[in-house]
Amino acid sequence: MTQICHVCNEQLEYDGQISLDRFYLRALGLVERVGGYNRLGADGKQFVDAVTWQYYRQFPQEYGRRYEGIVSIGAVLQDSQIDRMANKHRLLKITESPITEKYLGLLVHRACFDGNGCHNVDLSRIKTAEQALDWLFHLGEKAWFHPLGFIMILEELFPESRGKAQSFYVGGD
């Protein structure tokens, strides 16, 4: 397994974790402490940018664009690229209509995010797809668990299982 940390975009081996929490509160607190997004240092911006981007990826029904009629793939790709760079705008949208009942998942190095106060799963405990499914079922019993986000992370960790975990979790073939 060789994946990328959501915060620093560096290679991630088994020295990381999946952290599950209401990260928008941490991101908002960080921005408020320094007096605005533009005053954040590089590390702070990386964290806020990672959190906002993952909210948009993992909660597409709440934060994604809704297109009507025929839309060109070019327009969708352009909108996606603009959204990827609009971190300050995304943070404002997330804090205006936050998702409080479900947790966001981040795939991170321990050094990039300490995970204090979060539900953390060390990657050393998810070395196989079978172990990943065990965690999926275990966490699925929690009221705060958001399966789509966790499944997206599992698909990053195990690209060969792309699409299988979600259909298995929701009762597909």
Image (cartoon, helix red, strand yellow):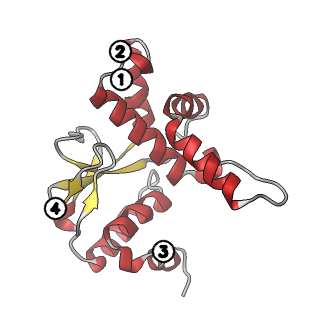
Q: Which residue is mark 3?
A: 169
**Reading the chain from its start, which is encountered first: label 4 or label 3?**
4
**Reading the chain from its start, which is encountered first: label 2 or label 4?**
4
Q: Position of residue 81 (x, y in %)?
A: 55, 46
Residue 141 appearing in the image: no
Question: Contact (CB < 8 A) between labels 4 and 3?
Answer: no
Q: CA distance from mark 4 to mark 3?
A: 25 Å
Q: Position of residue 102 (x, y in %)?
A: 49, 48
Q: Which residue is mark 4?
A: 14
Q: CA distance from mark 2 to mark 4?
A: 32 Å
Question: Contact (CB < 8 A) between labels 2 and 4?
Answer: no
Residue type indicated by callout 1: Leu
Q: Which mark is residue 30?
A: 1
Image quadrant in which you'd find residue 154: bottom left
Question: Compared to 81, does 49 lie above or below?
Answer: above
Q: Which mark is residue 144?
A: none
Q: Nearer the viewer, residue 71 or 157?
A: 71
Left or right side of 171 for 33? left
Which residue is at the far right?
69
